[in-house]
Image: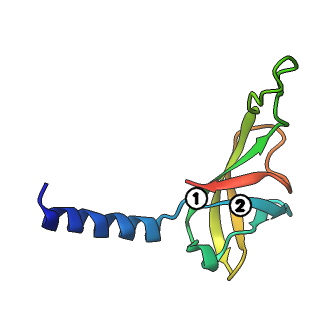
Amino acid sequence: MTAGFRGILDRLALKFKDHIPLCEGNVTEAPMPQVVIDLGNDRSIHQGMRFLAYREEDSLIDEKTGMNLGSDTEVCGLLSAREVDQTFSRVDIVEKFTQRGVHTGDKVISK
């Protein structure tokens, strides 16, 4: 690969990163049918951006070794940013994946 072509690919990758950032946050309020997340303009969030809401159970610890075996994760719903402020966003619940739905304390990750 030539150096010039590599430079073009690097600039293109930065544009994607700026337009579709990988962000993790939390649901801070859940006044249905919208919820509030703690991600906003300061994290390059924009209107229409999509997120997955999920819930992690407590970590499983092996009794014999004390080793952390990880935790179960439940994907709760698909969200879409409606109103984006500096440090938070109001998002619509586009689709629920569980009966429980999306609640305060659930985590979110950009999709």
Q: How crowded is mark 2: few (under 14 residues within 10 Å), some or many (20 or more)?
A: some
Q: Which of 26 and 95 is in front in this view?
A: 26
Q: Where is residue 17 in the image (x, y as percent from the top left)?
A: 44, 65
Q: Identify the residue shown where x is 78% and y is 43%.
A: 55
Q: In which quarter of the image is the N terminus?
A: bottom left
Q: Is mark 2 on a helix, strand or loop?
A: strand
Say if 83 sits above or below 21 in the image. Answer: below
Q: Where is residue 50 in the image (x, y as percent from the top left)?
A: 58, 58
Q: Distance between the residues labelled 2 and 1?
A: 13 Å
Of all residues shown, which one is farthest toward the left?
Answer: 2
Q: Identify the residue shown where x is 60% and y is 73%.
A: 43
Comparing labels 2 and 1, the label whose residue is closer to the camera: 2
Q: Nearer the viewer, residue 69 or 52?
A: 69
Q: Specify how the rendered protein is coloured.
A: rainbow
- 91 with respect to 2 (left or right): right
Say if 108 sits above or below 100 in the image. Answer: below
Q: Where is residue 59 in the image (x, y as percent from the top left)?
A: 82, 34
- 12 with respect to 26 (left or right): left
Disc 1 target residue? 50
Of all residues shown, which one is farthest toward the front?
Answer: 65
Q: Which mark is residue 15?
A: none
- Please name the amino acid that badge 1 sits on: Arg
Q: What element carries label 1?
A: strand
Q: Identify the residue shown where x is 70% and y is 72%.
A: 89
Disc 2 target residue? 25
Q: Earlier in the sequence, mark 2 or mark 1?
A: 2
